[in-house]
Image: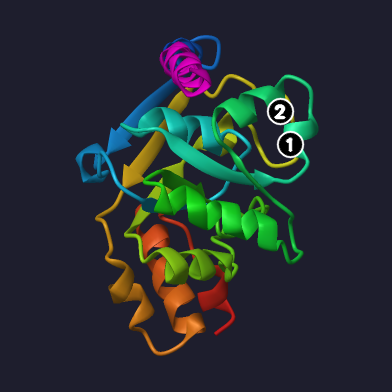
């Protein structure tokens, strides 16, 4: 009975927030959202979604653009924040400690994908102040190796107009924000590359191609 109730609450919240974002992106934020490659998103089954991270607005924009629910990896302290934490728990957010080993969080992320959910990850680990695509952290590979789930690269463009780096209060964007879904990549195509560095570089290239960003790793090679 509890599981049924949770499902009902989740479904109501899902529809409510889809409508809320559809309205607020247009007004008061004056965002014209352009979604490309939406048909590339598998409608069911475990999936690892990897995207660039320009703004704190990225999670709601990406979530709204996707044709299925996305479970996001987020900071471990988010569930303890009033109101925001309740929404994060309802949205099945996976809390993970930043820049520190977190076996519990990693285990939950793996279980989320294995249960058939789509897990959204910003592998840069933090916002990009320079707007370049920062080197991906290896945690995404740990999840990929354990789940063997397909990877969906995504490029997000223009969210820094809503919430620029360093700002916590959104502002009207008066422009277009784009979300570009790439082609699904089988896990073996990534894991067959000769090293972890090559695997991360490959994923970075896929996301950079969609976001139009310069890769910081490539600049230092």
Q: CA distance from mark 2 to mark 1?
A: 5 Å
**Relative depth, front residue between 96 and 115:** 115
Disc 1 packing (10 Å; few <14; some 14–19; many ≥20): some
> Viewed as shown, does residue 44 lie left or right of 207?
left
Relative to 107, is 147 on the left or the right?
A: left
* Image quadrant where residue 32 sits: top left
Majority secondary structure of magenta residues: helix
According to the picture, the residue beneath numbered tag 1 turns out to be 78
The answer to whether any part of residue 209 appears in the image is yes
Residue placed at 42% from the left, 27% from the top? 64
Tell me, yes or no, whether the highlighted magenta stretch contains residue 4: yes
Q: Position of residue 181 (x, y in %)?
A: 31, 46
Q: Is residue 109 left or right of residue 84?
A: left
Please name the residue that numbered disc 2 is placed on.
Answer: 85
Q: Which residues are magenta?
A: 1-17
- The magenta stretch spans residue 99: no
Return the x and y of residue 167 as percentages of the image width and height: 74, 33
Residue 194 left/right relative to 45: right
> Which residue lies at the image location 40% right of the left edge and 33% below the top edge?
69
Under circle 1, the secondary element is helix
Question: Residue at left 55%, top 53%?
Answer: 109
Q: How is the image coloured?
A: rainbow
Tag 2 and tag 1, C-beta contact below 8 Å = yes
Q: Position of residue 45 (x, y in %)?
A: 30, 47
Quadrant in the picture for the C terminus: bottom right
């Amino acid at each position: 009975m509890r599981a049924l109730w949770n499902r009902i609450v989740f479904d109501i919240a899902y529809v409510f927030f889809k409508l809320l974002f559809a309205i607020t992106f247009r007004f008061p934020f004056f965002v014209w959202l352009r979604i490309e490659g939406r048909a590339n998103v598998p409608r069911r089954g475990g999936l690892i979604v990897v995207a660039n991270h320009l703004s704190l607005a990225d999670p709601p924009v990406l979530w709204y653009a996707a044709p299925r629910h996305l479970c996001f990896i987020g900071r471990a302290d988010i569930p303890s924040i009033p109101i925001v934490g309740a929404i994060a728990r309802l949205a099945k957010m996976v809390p993970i400690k930043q820049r520190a080993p977190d076996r519990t969080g990693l285990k939950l992320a793996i279980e989320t994908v294995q249960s058939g959910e789509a897990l959204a990850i910003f592998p840069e680990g933090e916002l990009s102040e320079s707007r370049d695509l920062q080197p991906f952290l290896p945690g995404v590979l740990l999840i990929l190796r354990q789940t063997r789930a397909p990877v969906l690269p995504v490029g997000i463009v223009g969210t820094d107009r809503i919430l620029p780096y360093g700002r916590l209060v959104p502002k009207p964007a008066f422009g277009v924000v784009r979300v570009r879904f790439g082609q699904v990549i089988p896990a073996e195509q990534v894991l067959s590359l000769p090293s972890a560095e090559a695997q991360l570089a490959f994923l970075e290239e896929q996301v950079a191609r969609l976001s139009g960003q310069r890769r910081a790793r490539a600049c230092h090679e």
